[in-house]
Image (cartoon, grey):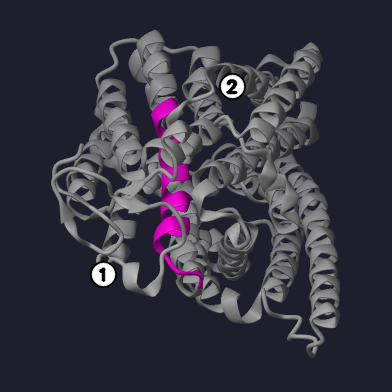
Amino acid sequence: MRDGDTDLAGTSRSSGPTAPAGSATTDELDPRRWRALFVMLMGQFCALLDVSVTNVALPSIGRSTGAGPTELQWVVSGYILAFGLMPVIGGRLGDATGRRRMFVVGVSGFVVASAAAGLAPSPGALIAVRVVQGLFGGVIGPQVSGFIQNTFPRAERGRAFGRLGLTVGVGTALGPVVGGLLIAAGGPEYGWRLVFFINVPIGLVAVLLARAWVPVVRPRAASSSRLDLLGALLLGTGLLCVLFPIVEINQLHDVRLFLLLVPAAGLLLMFVRREAHLTRADAGPLLDLRLFRVPTFVTGVVFAVVFFCSNTGIPLVLSLYYQDGLGFTALHSGLGVTALALGSVLGAPLAGRLVQRVGRPLVVGAVLVFFLATTVIGVVLLLDPVVTPLQVGLRLALPLFALGIAGGSIVTPNQTLTLAEVDPVRGGAAGGVLQTAQRVGSATGQTVLGTVFVAALGAGAAAGTAGRPGPYTGAVTSALAVSLVFSGAALVLSVVELRRARRRAAVRAHEDGRQVPDPSAP
């Protein structure tokens, strides 16, 4: 891994120390940092795409492999659970051993697991490699956010996080579209295998370019390379006990699953106590609890959980509505949310450019737009139900486009503002916590909205037939109403944090004897 390493200044090194961790200065800026970020986002895109792309492939997987409903559920759940367990651990490893090293490890493992998934001969084998795929996928994300913290000066981080937000939005929204196209191209037998094989060439290119372009950042201290294995075990088991009932309740329909939250609380409490001790002793904690002394970081993490509860469940219930209620094909269902993906493409980078100038008011405005766009979608479906792919495209295009722009304009500023005051040395761990919050919110939102959809559908499902949605319209609008509860809570949080930011700015200005700065500044 040492041959050809580069530091932040772009100086070639064959061995020896690399650039120190921390925020890059003007003299240290690597002129290749933007293309290095592009390479890392390639890996992130693959990992995020696999969260949603598999959903549309499940019917083909079932017909091809003979997988039953429970096995098909685990094809999705196994990946989501593993993907949600790794960000904090992966972020700590990136802080300790270097972003590029862990990025290459994560993408390489993800590529091998993707190829194995495409070749899987049985449902059991597919589930096993999907779990492995999720573990390696969860390692990739923290390296990207940590790389941005270490390599980009504060003035550029908004743009860099804008590209990351673009990747998150597009990777999530394009999943159904990409899945539908690949299944149509490969047919019922091989189409679902293409869904996994598509990761292989992208991942291989990302690994090769990473070794050429991504700089290496030396850990701050040699002792920081130690990994808290007991802490990792406590955190991983605790998160599993939290995520398992959330992900599986729709399949197993057994509320006793939530009894797992009791041991989860105990395990996570033990983890916090251990990490508090290691933090005080400066003994290489898995999660440095000094992060939670930063008010903007704490608020951003809580906001991420609440907003992702609202955001990620919407494409899921729309897909159920399109395919089950309207009889759309997987391809038509994917195309039905294309406007959402296009909005994300525009919203995330635009917000990244504006966040340094506008600050938290940008988040407040974007959440308000998201809330209103969700409301409009529900009203359109209730007052004038769509029954053909063309009608979907015409009647829902504008509100879905607005929803995408708002979503992209929320994720990017929240990441930028959440990590703005975090020590870049802890950037990987901080990014891991933020991504874990997003994964918990995503899983919770998909579960809650999906459960409400099924419950509202109830025994009247038989009344809905292809082209005549019947109770499916009521089911999807009920789920959207729950999404409004979450986005409303996110709006309240963002307004409260804006007011706190203004008070903090006023106090600092008073103490410094200066004029109060512009409250819209981040």
Give the mark nearer the N terminus: 1 vs 2: 1
Residue 276 in view of the camera? yes
> Which of the numbered marks, if any, corresponds to residue 31?
1
Disc 2: which residue:
236
Residue 342's spot in the image, x, y percent? Answer: 46, 65
Residue 151 on the magenta segment: yes
Q: Looking at the picture, tell me which residue is in the foreground, 69 or 388.
A: 69
- Dominant secondary structure, magenta: helix
Q: Which residue type carries mark 2?
A: Gly
Give the mark toward the camera: 1 or 2: 1
Measured in 3D between alpha carbons, the distance from the residue under mark 1 to the one under mark 2, in whole angstroms, is 38 Å
Instruction: Please indicate whether residue 433 sits to the left or right of residue 157 in the image.
Output: right
Could you tell me which residue is drawn at 63 percent across and 63 percent down? 417
Is the residue 91 above or below the residue 394 in the image?
A: above
Could you tell me which residue is drawn at 80 percent across and 86 percent down? 516
Q: How many residues crowd around disc 2 within 10 Å: few (fewer than 14), some, or many (20 or more)?
A: many
Q: Secondary structure at mark 2?
A: helix
Q: Which residue type carries mark 1?
A: Pro
Q: Looking at the picture, tell me which residue is in the foreground, 105 or 288.
A: 288
Instruction: Please indicate whether residue 110 sits to the left or right of residue 135 in the image.
Output: left
Residue 257 on the magenta segment: no
Residue 189's spot in the image, x, y percent? Answer: 27, 24
Instruction: Please indicate whether residue 396 sits to the left or right of residue 64 in the image.
Output: right
Residue 61's spot in the image, x, y percent? Answer: 38, 22
Could you tell me which residue is drawn at 50 percent across and 76 percent down? 353
Start-end of magenta stretch? 134-154
Residue 55 in view of the camera? no
